[in-house]
Amino acid sequence: YQDLTGQALCKPCPAGSYCTYFSTGTVNVTICPSGHYCLPRATAPIVCQSGSYNPTQGNSSCIVCPGGSYCPYNQANGVGTPGAISCPAGFFCPQSSIEPTACAAGDYQDLPGQAACKPCPSGSYCTHSASGTQVVTVCPSGHYCPARSTAAIVCTSGNYQPSQGTSGCIVCPAGSYCPFNQ
């Protein structure tokens, strides 16, 4: 394009903009919209790929979605994400995520905006509801819960555990009787 008269050479469409050429010889230079990027000499904006975003207009590249956030791409209407969305509690979002990922069994995440889940601590067990809610429960007496437990494990016969929140059972002392699940 050329925005000055009397020039011998044309200018390339600048990065961060796209140029629409008309049959009349006129050119319309348009700032690249958010959620898109425009390389030099672009004739149309390019939608940011899944896992990336662009919060402002006039950019020639997109930003990789940071860990703890997700950046979806709407394929139905070809719209890129103008901003990163914070990952909800109960999920994790590593870098370049397009959607939140639920924590695996034995893991949990009680905070929003996290890139990884936490392992269920020893002495507790972690359950997940159908809605994605995660509950960390202290292991009851008569049971034990190693790290990443999804349920409390009953102490076997000959063992006992009088305390809550433990990761193991105690062997019944010689000369004592320890019934099942004490």
Image (cartoon, rainbow, N blue to C red):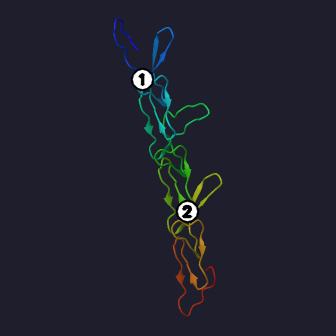
Task: Say which amino acid is labelled 2.
Answer: Gly
The CA span between labels 2 and 1 is: 52 Å
Q: Nearer the viewer, residue 89 or 4?
A: 4
The residue tagged with tag 2: helix, strand or loop? loop
Among all residues in the image, which is located at the extreme right? 130
Q: Answer whether labels 2 and 1 touch (C-beta < 8 Å).
A: no
How packed mark 2 is, by other alpha carbons closer than 10 Å (few <14, some 14-19, many 20 or more), is many
Among all residues in the image, which is located at the extreme front? 8
Quarter placement of the C terminus: bottom right
- The mark tally for this picture is 2
The disc, 2 or 1, on the residue closer to the chain's N-terminal end is: 1
Compared across the picture, whether 156 is left or right of 36 comes to right
Compared across the picture, whether 20 is left or right of 9 comes to right
Quarter placement of the N terminus: top left
Q: Is residue 169 above or below residue 133?
A: below
Residue at 56% from the left image edge and 69% from the top image edge: 139
The image's mark for residue 41 is 1
Q: Nearer the viewer, residue 163 or 23?
A: 23
Compared across the picture, whether 113 is left or right of 178 comes to left
The image's mark for residue 106 is 2
The residue tagged with tag 1: helix, strand or loop? loop
Q: Nearer the viewer, residue 96 or 126?
A: 96
